[in-house]
Image (cartoon, grey):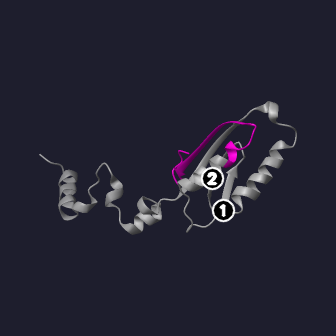
Amino acid sequence: MKTNKEKLQEEIAKAYPHLIPTRDCKKHRSLRLQKKLKLGKFTEYGISSKINFNLAHVSEGYWDELTVRFQDEIITPNKFIMGGTVLDCFITAEDSNMVIDEDMRRKVAAWFSAIPAVVDVKVKLVDAWSFNA
């Protein structure tokens, strides 16, 4: 015998089949909700970077100089916003209408790779609103 709760769930499922959750719940969200939650075609991306340096090549004031160069050559001209330090940062678009894509990620990775003191570069394109960067 079914409980009242189970009966109610069945009635709702019959009346509103598009609201039944599946493994991919994103398919059943309205465009308005997808936009609000920044899902699907409304996903906003950012660039997560982690850099390792050879400390033998690093002198006093190197980090300040590198940060200023990074701001001047990558962040400001591309209208990015950076959070963190040069060693471990997250970069996203200054304007919500701007799209960060794989080309931008490659540009950032190439900039870091060109620095002689850099030993390891990890630059990923990630969902800016998920916290798994």
Q: Is residue 128 visible?
A: no
Q: Residue at x 41, y 69 (%)?
A: 32
Circle 1: residue type: Asn
> Which label sits in the foreground, 1 or 2?
2
Residue 120 position within the rendered picture, expressed as x and y whole percent measured from the top left = 65, 35
Q: In this view of the protein, which residue sits in the foreground, 70 or 39? A: 70
According to the image, label 1 marks what residue?
78
Q: Is residue 1 visible?
A: yes
Is 72 covered by the magenta stretch? no
Q: In this view of the protein, which residue sits in the foreground, 27 or 60? A: 60
Q: Residue at x 63, y 45 (%)?
A: 49
Image position of 79 with respect to 131: above or below: below
Q: In this view of the protein, which residue sits in the foreground, 8 or 55? A: 55
**Disc 1 to disc 2, how far (Cα)?**
10 Å
* Disc 2: CA contacts within 10 A as few (<14), some (14-19) or many (>=20): few
Q: Which mark is residue 107?
A: 2
Q: Quadrant of the N terminus?
A: top left
Q: Residue at x 28, y 51 (%)?
A: 22
Q: Which mark is residue 35?
A: none
Residue 5 position within the rendered picture, expressed as x and y whole percent measured from the top left = 22, 52
Residue 93 position within the rendered picture, expressed as x and y whole percent measured from the top left = 61, 61
Circle 2: residue type: Lys
Residue 19 shown left or right of residue 93 in the figure: left
- Residues tagged 1 and 2 counted as in contact (Cβ below 8 A): yes
Element on which disc 2 rests: helix
Please state the extent of the stretch shown in magenta in the rendering: 111-133
Q: Residue at x 33, y 51 (%)?
A: 24
Q: In this view of the protein, which residue sits in the foreground, 94 or 22? A: 94
* Disc 1: CA contacts within 10 A as few (<14), some (14-19) or many (>=20): some
